[in-house]
Amino acid sequence: MAFNMQWKNSTTRYGHISLLIHWLVAIVVYGMFALGLWMVSLGYYDVWYHQAPEIHKSIGMLLFFIMLFRVVWRFISPPPKPLPSYSKLTKVASISAQILIYIILFSILISGYLISTADGQPISVFGWFNVPALFTGAATQADSAGEIHLYLAWAVVLLSVLHAFAALKHHFYDGDITLKRMLGFNPDK
């Protein structure tokens, strides 16, 4: 399989923009998950107690904008067609899992926003710009959003692990090119 520069998706393979977004989001989600678990374990007098949440919020807002771009990009450059060897169940499961991952990711980002702005303060994104607090005042906004945020974070990690196992199953058991397409290899060569 040859590695060829292609920005947009084709009917048979993913373009480099889709690949970059996919892997960037995966790395950021796992990094944010680890950062989130670590920062809630910090004591009040720990030097990172205030800095870690600010980093988490800033990255979360940037991730929200990347995800918005990702959705728009899917319309500009639709993903490759499913392989002819896929069963109907595989096609439905694949599309359903992708939609569910998108819904969960946006829900995590929105719940994080609701946690961060519950006190009416904007979110400063690395000091570059502020995202205003639009929804405030609910008595339990931070707590309710926090609980949702935690459960959905675990859900997206578990779902992404299943997603990875499915790709490995396609590669090693089915012997098809699903994983190679997501790694940027040209299946036509």
Image (cartoon, helix red, strand yellow):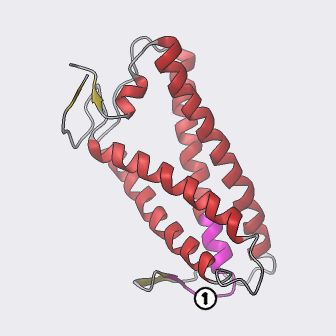
Q: Which residue is mark 1?
A: 121
Quadrant in which the C terminus appears? top left
Q: In which quarter of the view is residue 188 placed?
A: top left
Q: Residue 174: x and y, percent? A: 49, 12
Q: Taking the image as drawn, is residue 41 in sight?
A: yes
Which residue: 18% across, 39% down? Answer: 5
Q: Residue 147: x and y, percent? A: 78, 63
Q: Is residue 142 left or right of residue 58?
A: right
Q: Residue 148: x and y, percent? A: 74, 60
Q: Is 93 or 169 nearer to us in this picture?
A: 169
Q: Is residue 99 left or right of residue 76?
A: right
Q: Residue 110: x and y, percent? A: 60, 65
Which residue: 22% across, 43% down? Answer: 7
Number of numbered markers: 1
Which residue: 54% across, 20% down? Answer: 169
The residues colored magenta run 110-124
